[in-house]
Image (cartoon, rainbow, N blue to C red):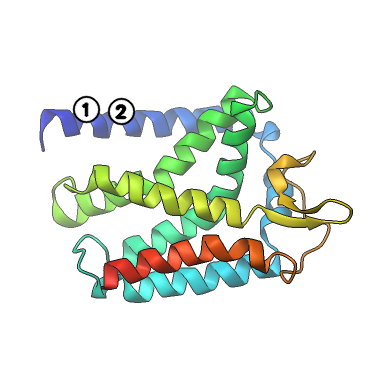
């Protein structure tokens, strides 16, 4: 491993440790109970299951040797669990409506899910840092952002379809948990994921 990659590895590991400390030192400020209720909505679980199974099943059959059942499943699960909150929190942070502590943790979760877990797994599997680490950041971040936006969609009476992080109290369980009114708005995000999978297969 080059000196630059070693430095990068130790830097992101240190950042992850910092995020654990930021969370552990002020756990009450992180809305885990509310987020669980926000996330565990039937249509979100169904779309996640379909996407995760699809990505994981096709992973070994792509032209990318770094993609297999393990990292595909791992990244899918982490994305579902973290992307809705991370994307919303970073947006609110940009608007000055989220604590710096929360934004730093959100960035760490984004990078862990879209890149660092992939890097570490391949480092352990292959004994060397993946040469695709930088390309993967961009490709996986597009999917991560798309997933975060998709699972933030909700319908509010009198307001219509919106993103949950634009509403007061984020994250809270949506007022309506059906998918029918969201389907048209969610389609672009789902098509993006489908096109990415199809690209690697072709």
Residue at which label 2 appears: 11
Does residue 198 appear left or right of residue 40 in this picture? left
User: Where in the figure is residue 55, as x and y percent of width and height?
Assistant: 39, 69
Give me the residue at 83% from left, 57% from top. 175
- Above or below 199: residue 89: above
Whether tag 1 and tag 2 are in contact, CB under 8 A, the answer is: yes
In this view of the protein, can residue 192 be seen by the observer? yes
| Separation of marks 1 and 2 at Cα, in angstroms | 6 Å
How many numbered markers are drawn? 2
Residue at 64%, 27% (x, y): give it: 95
Classify residue 161 as left or right of residue 90: right
Any part of residue 25 in sight? no
How would you rate the neighbour count of disc 2 (Cα within 10 Å): few for under 14, some for 14-19, many for 20 or more?
A: few
Q: Quadrant of the N terminus?
A: top left
Left or right of 103? Residue 71 is: left
Residue at 69 percent across and 27 percent down: it is 97
């Amino acid at each position: 491993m080059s000196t630059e990659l070693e430095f990068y590895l130790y830097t992101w590991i240190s950042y992850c440790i910092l995020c654990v400390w930021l969370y552990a030192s002020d756990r009450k400020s992180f809305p885990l109970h509310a987020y669980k209720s926000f996330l565990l909505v039937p249509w979100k679980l169904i779309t996640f299951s379909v996407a995760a199974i699809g990505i994981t099943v096709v992973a070994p059959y792509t032209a990318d040797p770094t993609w297999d059942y393990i990292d595909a499943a791992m990244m899918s699960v982490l994305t579902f669990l973290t992307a809705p909150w991370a994307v919303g929190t970073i947006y609110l942070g940009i608007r000055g409506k989220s604590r710096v502590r929360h934004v730093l943790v959100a960035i760490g979760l984004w990078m862990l899910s879209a890149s660092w877990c992939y890097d570490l797994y391949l480092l352990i599997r292959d004994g060397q840092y993946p040469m695709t680490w930088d390309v993967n950041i961009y490709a996986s971040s597009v999917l991560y952002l798309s997933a975060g936006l998709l699972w933030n969609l909700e319908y509010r009476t009198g307001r219509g379809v919106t993103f949950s992080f634009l509403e007061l109290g984020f994250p809270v369980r949506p007022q309506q948990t059906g998918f029918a009114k969201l389907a048209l708005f969610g389609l672009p995000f789902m098509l993006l994921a489908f096109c990415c999978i199809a690209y690697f297969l072709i």
